[in-house]
Amino acid sequence: MFIGYIYKITGSCGKVYIGSTRNYKNRVEQHRFDKRERSNSKLLVKPLKFEIIRQDEYKLVKTMYLVEQFYIDINDCVNQQRAFGRRLEIREYKKEYNIKNKKKISDWQKVYRETHKEELKKKKKVYSETHKEYFKEKCKEYRETHKEEIKKKMKKYWSIKIECIYCKKIILKGNICKHHKTKRCLAIQESLKDAK
């Protein structure tokens, strides 16, 4: 079972696009910012107005697509493809292709990341700047919902004892950075450097 959303985008030109999704926030972001967006929502003139037409619980994705198709049929919209049928075929084909060509895809991704290092760095920076508030909210939400879990992890982390690689003193893992800056440890680090 999952929550599915049927949504409507209205452009300032008056034209309408109907869509469906499981994750409404992400889908809105894709329509607004993703240059690779393949849907006909690109035909709408900005600014765009987003609204949820319907929110239901579904067992099958196909059912959600059928509901979406109903709204496409009763509205005059820019959608050119049917909501179901072809979309499900494509999804199944992609799944199979990804399973069969896992190694090939990971090799290609590795090469792509290495050859486009600077470009990807810039994109990442732009993305993190434009989504700063979104990430802040997500982090805050996560911390609030996982309070006890985080507390336990921190308690466990701070209680682990480790040996300093320089002076061989046993200290708590959480204090290691602070310890490396102490006079005694710094003196030993210097003597080790000189010995080299």
Image (cartoon, rainbow, N blue to C red):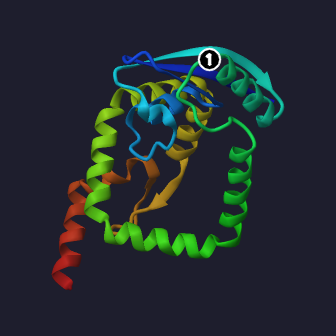
Q: Quadrant of the C terminus?
A: bottom left
- Asked whether 184 or 172 is in front, the reply is 172
143 in relation to 105, above or below: above
- Asked whether 121 or 140 is in front, the reply is 121
The residue at the point 19 percent across, 77 percent down is 193
Q: Amino acid at mark 1?
A: Asn
Give the residue number, with chain letter if any, for mark 1. Answer: 75
* Image-quadrant location for residue 56: top right
Q: Is residue 26 visible?
A: yes
x and y, in percent, of residue 150 in the image: 56, 34
* Image-quadrant location for residue 105: bottom right
x and y, in percent, of residue 43 in the image: 42, 32
Question: Relative to 119, is 57 on the left or the right?
Answer: right
x and y, in percent, of residue 153 in the image: 58, 40
Question: Relative to 153, is 118 on the left or the right?
Answer: left
- Asked whether 14 or 67 is in front, the reply is 14
* SS at circle 1: loop
Q: Quadrant of the N terminus?
A: top right
The residue at the point 30 percent across, 49 percent down is 123
111 in relation to 170, above or below: below
Label 1 packing within 10 angstroms: few (<14), some (14-19), many (20+): few
